[in-house]
Image: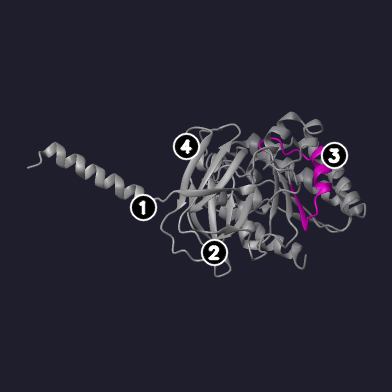
Amino acid sequence: MMNKTMLSLVALLICCGSLFAQTPALVYHDAMTFPVIGKYHTETNYNRLPAKYEKTVRPAVWALSRNSAGVAIRFRTNATTIGARWKVLNNNAMNHMTATGIRGLDLYALVNHQWQFVNSAIPGNDARSEKTILKKGDGSWREYVLFLPLYDGVDSLSIGVNTGAVIEKPQQSLLIDKKPIVYYGSSIAQGGCATRPGMAYTNILVRQLQRPFINLGFSGNGMFETAVGEAICETDPSLIVIDCNPNTAPELIHERAVKLVEQIRACKPQTPVLLVENYMYEHAYFEKDIHDIVFRKRAELKKAYNDLKKAGVKNLHYISGDGFLGADHEGTVDGVHPNDVGMERFAAHILPTLRKLTKGL
């Protein structure tokens, strides 16, 4: 008769064997071989700005441009198991944002013409991670989009599928066939502090509008800079959104906003431009100095808008900062950056304006 130790060992081996059987070995494919959305240049990387801008933008902007916010991979497969191997550039961590939002991946599948969340690839503690995202799928052919990290860069990325499955470029042109929206802004635009990449409001809007976004949100560094304007001029957008009030001192907003819009209008004479006011920070309801700064910033942007309109600038639009995060004051992580509730509300609030301005484009 087997003793208890032997029986326990046998049970453990059976259990382990069962677990290994449930997760088949995956065949990995370089993600760069599939369509990459959310970046405008053709360099073989996941950076938001091409290499030449290292010499022309401020060092902080260049470093942040290597974060892959808004970049995503489109593919189709009949795999029953899907995984990812990826290495991030910096292995960043913050105390008010999840590791999955900073360094993780989000997989969505096309279901009834809408993008439905499948699962996240939650990063490990090191720069390199390997995670199974989908297990025991039904093997149906599906179209997918994989959103990349918001607050770290991607050095390498491979998508794995089970042996015998096929992974290939998408058949449907969704997220590929429309001109992108270029969104220039702050940490909020970059995706802080969404719990996972798909919940950044720009990525929510990607799915709702079926249109890619070029995310030029630079944490703490969205400041109406003409050096970034040069990059915007290289894009082929349906709409340009400028949402830089949060990071810019009130006394700089008018001059810089006017110069940036004039620069964009010179290189993109027909493209609609939308100026976005800063919303009220939660602590500003209790701190008068912050409250006053919010309104000073709004006044300076509105003055810039009015002066530009008087100067004859066409197809320039404006949206106030009221109503972006709802009325219950529960839309932020830290009084400033949206949580997932805030991200959804932000997207819902601006969506009708974006639909209107990109109609037919």
Judge from the rendering whether residue 167 lies leftward or rightward of residue 216; answer left or right.
left
Look at mark 2 in the image and give the residue it sits on. Answer: 142
- Asked whether 238 falls inside the magenta stretch, the response is yes
Give the magenta range: 219-242
Instruction: Identify the image quadrant of residue 256.
Output: top right
| Mark sitting earlier along the chain (2/3) | 2
| Mark sitting earlier along the chain (1/4) | 1
| Mark sitting earlier along the chain (3/4) | 4
Judge from the rendering whether residue 52 lies leftward or rightward of residue 351; answer left or right.
right
Residue drawn at point x = 68 percent, y = 37 percent: 66
Look at mark 4 in the image and give the residue it sits on. Answer: 124
Q: Check disc 3 and give the amino acid type.
A: Glu
Residue 115 position within the rendered picture, expressed as x and y whole percent measured from the top left: 56, 62
Residue nearest the observer in this picture, 48 or 314: 48
Q: Nearer the viewer, mark 1 or mark 4?
A: 1
Judge from the rendering whether residue 187 lies leftward or rightward of residue 130; answer left or right.
right
- Asked whether 262 falls inside the magenta stretch, the response is no
Residue nearest the observer in this picture, 317 or 211: 211
Q: Nearer the viewer, mark 3 or mark 4?
A: 4
Q: Report how far apart the C-alphas of labels 1 and 2 lie in the structure.
A: 21 Å
Q: Quadrant of the N terminus?
A: top left
